[in-house]
Amino acid sequence: MVDFGKLPDLILADGGITQIRAIKNALKENQLEDKIPVFGMIKDDKHSTKALINEERKEFEISENLFHFITNLQDEVHKTAIEYHRKVRDKEMTKSKLDEITGIGEKKRSLLLKKFGSIKKLKEADVTEIAKVKGINLNLAKKIKEEL
């Protein structure tokens, strides 16, 4: 069993019975299935949570205060997920073949691209020309040429 520290009083899944069962399976693998109640969220046609559901498919209506709390919670979770995926996408978009070469960090990559303007022009450059870039010695220049 994994030590999770202090356990939550409740787990809310932003989905229905399938998500509840996945969570319950993970809890069971860690002998926690009877220690933490799990509820899923039933959505209306506007994707707003209108009720909670348990594993037995019993629905629990929610008060207006709880509705607002869950909505704020969902908004924060979605905001965090969107920010994370944007960072991953942005990092992927700015990734270059230079990132895969050992010995080339962000600073050297930046200097190389500033000097040559593109990976294509860097590929076409002579090893001695590449070695003129600050921080790039002849061995690293050869490695860059080989890996590009």
Image: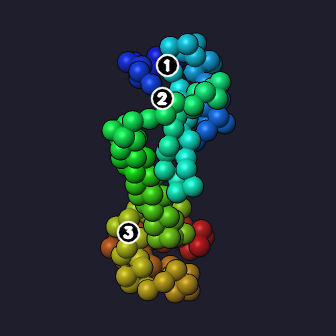
Identify the secondary structure beneath mark 1: loop
Which residue is pictured at 37% across the width and 73% down the height? 110
| Amino acid type, residue under disc 3 in the picture | Lys
Which residue is pictured at 45% across the width and 25% down the height? 10
Image-based side of 67 in relation to 144, left or right: left
Nearer to the camera, 80 or 133: 80
Q: Distance between the residues labelled 3 and 2?
A: 46 Å
Image-based side of 82 in relation to 18, left or right: left
Residue at which label 3 appears: 108
Expressed as whole percent of the image width and height from the top left, the position of residue 115 reads 38, 84
| Amino acid type, residue under disc 1 in the picture | Ile
Expressed as whole percent of the image width and height from the top left, the position of residue 45 reads 57, 55
Q: In the picture shown, does residue 21 fall above or below 76?
A: above
Instruction: Answer whether residue 53 is visible to the viewer in this image.
Output: yes
Identify the secondary structure beneath mark 3: helix
Nearer to the camera, 9 or 100: 9
Q: Do the residues labelled 2 and 1 touch (CB within 8 Å)?
A: yes
Q: Residues within 10 Å of mark 2 (few under 14, many from 20)?
A: some
- Say whether disc 1 or disc 3 marks the residue closer to the N-terminus: 1
Expressed as whole percent of the image width and height from the top left, the position of residue 62 reads 44, 35
Residue at which label 1 appears: 36
- Say whether disc 2 or disc 1 marks the residue closer to the N-terminus: 2
Identify the secondary structure beneath mark 2: strand
Colour theme? rainbow
Q: Residues within 10 Å of mark 3 (few under 14, many from 20)?
A: some
Residue at which label 2 appears: 11
- Say whether disc 3 or disc 2 marks the residue closer to the N-terminus: 2
Q: In which quarter of the image is residue 107?
A: bottom left
